[in-house]
Amino acid sequence: MSSHNTFNPGKGEKLAQRLSRIVARLHRGERLDKHRLAEEHGVDVRTIERDLGERLLGIAERDADGNWRLTHAAQSTIPVKHLYGYARLSGTHNLFPDDSLRYLLEQLDMPEPSRPTRVQATPHEDLRGTSAFAALHAAILERHPCRFIYKGHARLALPYRLIHKSGIWYLAAEEDARLKNFSIGLINKLEVDSTACFPINPAHIKYIDANDDVWYTTETTEVLLRVAPEAAHYFSRQQLLPNQQHRTDSDGSLLVTSKVNHIHQMLPVVRHWLPHVRILSPAAWHDELVAGLKQALRRWES
């Protein structure tokens, strides 16, 4: 006869869990009410008072309104609540399945060799030593026009955003009334006109915020791909193409649709997954892919 055992944490473990949650909320900058805490944790108010006044002595203190907050001595130079802000800034807020403050603090407190997780670094260009990034950042805030040399040509641009995509930093800027992107690593002889100030175009801001890529154009092309079962998992678990949608067919293959701004936005992805991906439409893009492959083979064979 088999029985199902339900795990019930002991008194000591319940206490540890309760204290860790309270500390995490204090580090987030919350003001805590003892009555609400007692209700949330299913204990009486005297227990919460003992938690805050004795067990967390030096960590929690009562404020003028009778609520509890983090003591000044326990506050770090950079508040722990900024962990979330930094994660969003760096685009890593969905990196871990558990993004709770408690989990993040546990990882940071654990010596690196002992951590059960390891994140492989993504290759990034190194912009250290160049002053362009900081100058462009200031120009965007102050709305100053910029002049620079880009791919051998003089440019006059109105800067809107610094955007990081696939390890490369780009400048989203208006040139000749059109929104364009410029690789910051290729910008030379940057000059910021601090005597002028340009008006913001709300349409540009809306477009930049709505797009997850740096190919800027008002025209998009709908692409249809067939992905073989061997590679279907990789396309279904993450967005490899902008505005990607997919349908699984009975043979395990995927029918993938995407709306892209330029053929070269899609070709690197298709080439990477050859021979498991085929462009069904537009047919002209399939022909261009094949022509490019044949040209490469001729070069390699010569």
Image (cartoon, grey):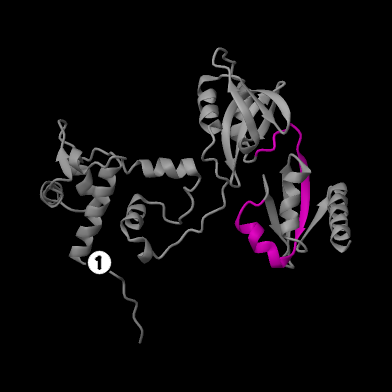
x, y (%) of residue 226?
A: 77, 58
Q: Residue furthest bottom?
A: 1
Q: Is residue 66 shown in magenta?
A: no
Depicted 145 relative to depicted 151: above or below: above
**Callout 1 amino acid:** Pro
Quadrant for the C terminus in the image: bottom right
Q: Which residue lies furthest to the top in this view?
A: 195
Q: Which residue is drawn at 45% across and 55% down?
A: 96
x, y (%) of residue 83?
A: 38, 44
x, y (%) of residue 191?
A: 59, 22
Left or right, 183 with reference to 284: left
SS at circle 1: loop
Depicted 68 relative to depicted 108: above or below: above
Note whether residue 134 is visible: yes
Note whether residue 207 is visible: no
Q: Is residue 218 shown in magenta?
A: yes
Residues in magenta, as a range: 214-240
Left or right, 201 with reference to 59: right
Q: What is the tally of numbered marks visible in this picture?
A: 1
Front residue (pair 139, 118): 139
x, y (%) of residue 4?
A: 34, 77
Q: Residue at x 77, y 47 (%)?
A: 223
Q: Which residue is drawn at 66% across and 24% down?
A: 174
Depicted 17 relative to depicted 63: above or below: below
Quadrant for the N terminus in the image: bottom left
Q: How crowded is mark 1: few (under 14 residues within 10 Å), some or many (20 or more)?
A: few
Q: Name the residue under label 1.
A: 9
Q: Which residue is drawn at 61% across and 54% down?
A: 238
Front residue (pair 7, 159): 159
Front residue (pair 139, 38): 139
Depicted 129 relative to depicted 200: above or below: below
